[in-house]
Image (cartoon, rainbow, N blue to C red):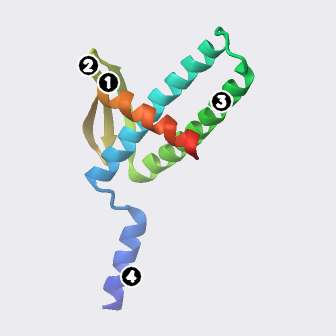
Amino acid sequence: MAIRYADEQVREREAPGYSAEDETTLVQRYILLGIVMLVLDHDIRVMGTGAIKLPRLYESLLRGIQDRVLLEQAALRLRFRKAGIKLMEERRLKDGMETVYICQGSTKRCYLPWSYLKAESEQAIKQYFKS
């Protein structure tokens, strides 16, 4: 019995068991963070052209959020590596974004409509402002 238990421990360490739901959630979050970065880049560019009283303050707030988004993306890439997930292609379509990725040898697709990405990116930015 002890040998069997040790064998299970070794196998768990070698290949962490990620479910399909976990991998999909990780990929969706990574895609969403890419959209958040695009929105923040756009808003920072626009910030300099407007007649805002404190443009440097707002720009520094947005850049701080950008830094945290980049850190989260880096953490997700580490989790991808551990889970055996590799993003292959991102395509912008008329009504959404499609991502092709490989997870543990099988090719999968993740499609997210623009309406979902817009709503979720607003929520993500709001969460970054709150924290």
Pointers 3 and 4 in contact (C-beta within 8 Å):
no
Secondary structure of the residue carrying tag 1 is helix
Q: Which residue is mark 3?
A: 63
Q: Position of residue 61 (x, y in %)?
A: 66, 32
Pointers 1 and 2 in contact (C-beta within 8 Å):
yes
Pointers 2 and 4 in contact (C-beta within 8 Å):
no
Query: Does the image show residue 11?
Result: yes
Q: What's the CA distance linking mark 4 and mark 1?
A: 48 Å
Secondary structure of the residue carrying tag 4 is helix
Q: What's the CA distance linking mark 1 and mark 2?
A: 6 Å
Q: What's the CA distance linking mark 1 and mark 3?
A: 24 Å
Of callouts 3 and 2, the N-terminal one: 3
Image quarter for residue 102? top left
Q: Within 10 angstroms of label 1, few (less than 14), some, or many (20 or more) residues?
A: some
Residue projecting furthest to the front: 53
Task: Name which residue type carries label 1.
Answer: Trp
Residue occupying the point 34% across, 83% down: 5
Of callouts 1 and 3, the N-terminal one: 3
Q: Within 10 angstroms of label 4, few (less than 14), some, or many (20 or more) residues?
A: few
Q: Which residue is mark 1?
A: 114
